[in-house]
Image: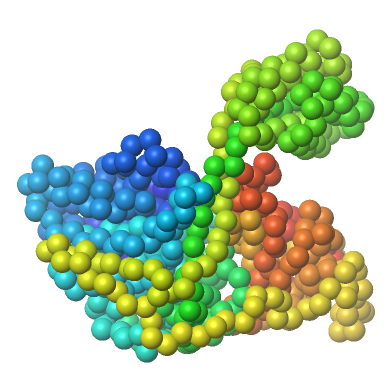
């Protein structure tokens, strides 16, 4: 058994988590995930400003108090905090070790950065064999750039158990475990639909641990005495996070999410087993960030009567002042009729402007908004003073052949080891819905098995949980039932057409729908919901993190006999 923990799910996660995990109990490996699509844009701007940067500086500060402890307890550290400059972070860690008087052996993985003159960053999502080579070469710490998040767990598994490229099922099992660990406390009760049922009410969930075994199965758990919980539902929630179809693509293996079995294994313990794998695709995903231009936002408060007319007046006035190009108006009807105070009686008109010209998107726009204060609708007020525009980025993804990328493991000795691409690869079918047509596009027609079933009006979230997130310009929305009977109803009832009705902003979007019976879940991929990605989005919920909770809040006809 290899005991692998996680201490970071994103750049900005709980600063003290590394110390908490090292002090909380036995570990063999401690991982930290710092990279997301938005993070690569941030690091790209850092690197452009200073060539010595481009990595997650927070990780270096965290190691100030943890490095000696990790070495004393022989806990290997594996992190992608290297970002765009893994060699730079490795050198900084060596300097830190020398200053602390704790010599440290560091390996790093390179080769993910690709030449794209028109891009700020372009990085291939590498696999786990470079990490494994560094660990086998004696590294205490392995630093990577852009590898798949799951590779932080798969790499130690390869080094410990000796998995070969043809050991597809163990690789697939470890990949699923890596996906579960990658977002830290999100698998131990963080962001959980039923957080009020957690022992501590979700106040401070602990970070997760996987007891990984040679066949790729694992038990998910956490240190004793830490908050949150590990249950089949918290694990299901994370399994559904930012995934697409049942085939979960990776550079080393394709993991079948429809083969995952979750079994309770005692208090705060869930066994993850049965995962099967198929050969990886012949291409690697490449994440590309570019500077998209400049943007600015101003928000008008509209109070009382004639909300729509007041918003229309502001729209016309601003278009007259700065022109219509790049302007976006979003009216949030947060107002209540016959309210007793100003805030409850007010709606918010968010106005965004995106432009290649920082002057037009800057003071020319924001000052024009402020100038309306005495010359617009009654009660005109804004939430902020005028300000300058800020640059924004856009994210896109494409592919390159696996053998076109040179993955290199730089061992603690300085030796560079080329990591060959897989010998056996397999083209993957085009993505698309594996069930449910849009023939019921209005989502209102009852099916034969439920047409005469007594119902009650209630929130959908009484009987289902949900987890949603971003993947570039797309979003995923996973919905799971709390019982077998609930799933029988859910898979029949929650069609693509009905989803479009419940979430009107998806009405014109291409949607893929996948059923995952082992998880009692249905997963949707909503193409284009987030436009050009998180950094460019002006959506109120730019990463679609709250989309699942919006769906759960909708009042629908629930079967009267379906238990909550």
**Position of 542 compared to 81: left or right?**
right
Placement of the N terminus among the 4 image quadrants: bottom left
Placement of the C terminus among the 4 image quadrants: bottom right
In this rendering, does residue 188 appear at all?
no
Residue 241 quadrant = bottom right
In this rendering, does residue 318 appear at all?
yes
Q: Position of residue 466 (x, y in %)?
A: 64, 63
For residue 308, above or below residue 220:
above
Residue located farthest toward the left when viewing the structure as drawn: 101
**Position of 460 compared to 251: left or right?**
right
The residue under the point 79% across, 27% down is 323
The residue under the point 66% across, 34% down is 355
| Residue closest to the eye, 86 or 273 | 86
Q: Position of residue 330 (x, y in %)?
A: 77, 37
Residue 170 quadrant = bottom left
Structure colour scheme = rainbow
The residue under the point 90% across, 84% down is 448
**Position of 319 compared to 227: left or right?**
right
| Residue closest to the eye, 468 or 1 | 468
Q: Position of residue 197 (x, y in %)?
A: 56, 59
């Amino acid at each position: 058994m290899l005991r692998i923990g996680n201490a970071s799910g994103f750049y900005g996660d709980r600063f003290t988590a590394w110390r908490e995990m090292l002090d909380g109990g036995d570990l063999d490996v401690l991982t930290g995930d710092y990279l997301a699509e938005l993070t690569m844009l941030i690091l790209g701007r850092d690197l452009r400003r200073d060539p010595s940067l481009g990595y997650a500086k927070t990780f270096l500060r965290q190691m100030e108090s943890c490095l000696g402890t990790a070495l004393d307890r022989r806990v290997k550290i594996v992190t992608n905090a290297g970002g765009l400059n893994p060699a730079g972070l490795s050198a900084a860690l060596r300097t830190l070790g020398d200053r602390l008087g704790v010599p440290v052996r560091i390996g790093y993985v390179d080769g993910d950065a690709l030449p794209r003159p028109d891009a700020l960053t372009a990085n291939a999502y590498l696999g786990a064999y470079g990490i494994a080579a560094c660990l086998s070469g004696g590294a205490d710490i392995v630093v990577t750039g852009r590898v798949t998040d799951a590779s932080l767990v798969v790499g130690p598994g390869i080094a410990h158990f000796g998995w070969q490229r043809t050991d597809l099922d163990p690789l697939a099992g470890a990949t699923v475990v890596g996906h579960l660990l990658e977002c830290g406390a999100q698998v131990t009760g963080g962001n959980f639909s039923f957080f009020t049922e957690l022992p501590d009410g979700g106040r401070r969930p602990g970070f997760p641990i996987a007891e990984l075994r040679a066949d790729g199965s694992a038990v998910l758990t956490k240190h004793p005495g830490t908050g949150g919980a590990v249950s089949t539902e918290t694990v299901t929630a994370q399994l559904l996070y930012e995934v697409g179809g049942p085939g979960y693509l990776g550079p080393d293996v394709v993991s079948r999410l429809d083969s995952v079995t979750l079994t309770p294994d005692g208090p705060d313990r869930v066994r993850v087993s049965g995962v099967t794998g198929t050969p990886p695709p012949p291409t690697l995903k490449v994440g590309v960030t570019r500077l998209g231009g400049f943007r600015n936002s101003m928000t008008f408060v509209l109070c009382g009567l004639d909300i729509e007319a007041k918003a229309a007046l502001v729209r016309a006035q601003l278009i007259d002042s700065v022109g219509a190009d790049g302007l976006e108006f979003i009216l949030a009807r947060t107002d209540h009729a016959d309210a007793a105070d100003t805030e409850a009686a007010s709606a918010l008109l968010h106005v965004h402007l995106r432009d290649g010209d920082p002057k037009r998107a800057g003071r020319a726009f924001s000052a024009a908004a402020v100038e309306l204060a005495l010359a617009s609708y009654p009660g005109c007020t804004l939430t902020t003073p005028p300000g300058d525009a800020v640059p924004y980025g856009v994210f896109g993804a494409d592919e390159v052949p696996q053998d076109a990328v040179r993955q290199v493991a730089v061992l603690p000795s300085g030796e560079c080891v080329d990591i060959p691409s897989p010998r056996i690869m397999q083209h993957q079918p085009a993505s698309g819905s594996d069930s449910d047509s849009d023939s019921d596009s209005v989502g209102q027609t009852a099916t034969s098995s439920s047409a005469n079933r007594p119902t009650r009006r209630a929130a959908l979230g009484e009987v289902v949980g949900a987890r949603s997130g971003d993947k570039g310009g797309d979003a995923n929305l996973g919905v799971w039932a709390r019982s077998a009977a609930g799933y029988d109803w859910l898979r029949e009832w929650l069609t693509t057409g009905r989803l479009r009705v419940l979430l009107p902003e998806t009405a014109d979007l291409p949607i893929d729908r996948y059923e995952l019976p082992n998880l009692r879940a249905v997963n949707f991929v909503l193409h284009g919901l987030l436009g050009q990605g998180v950094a460019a989005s002006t959506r109120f919920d730019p990463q679609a993190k709250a989309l699942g909770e919006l769906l759960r809040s909708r009042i629908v006809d629930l079967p009267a006999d379906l238990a909550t």
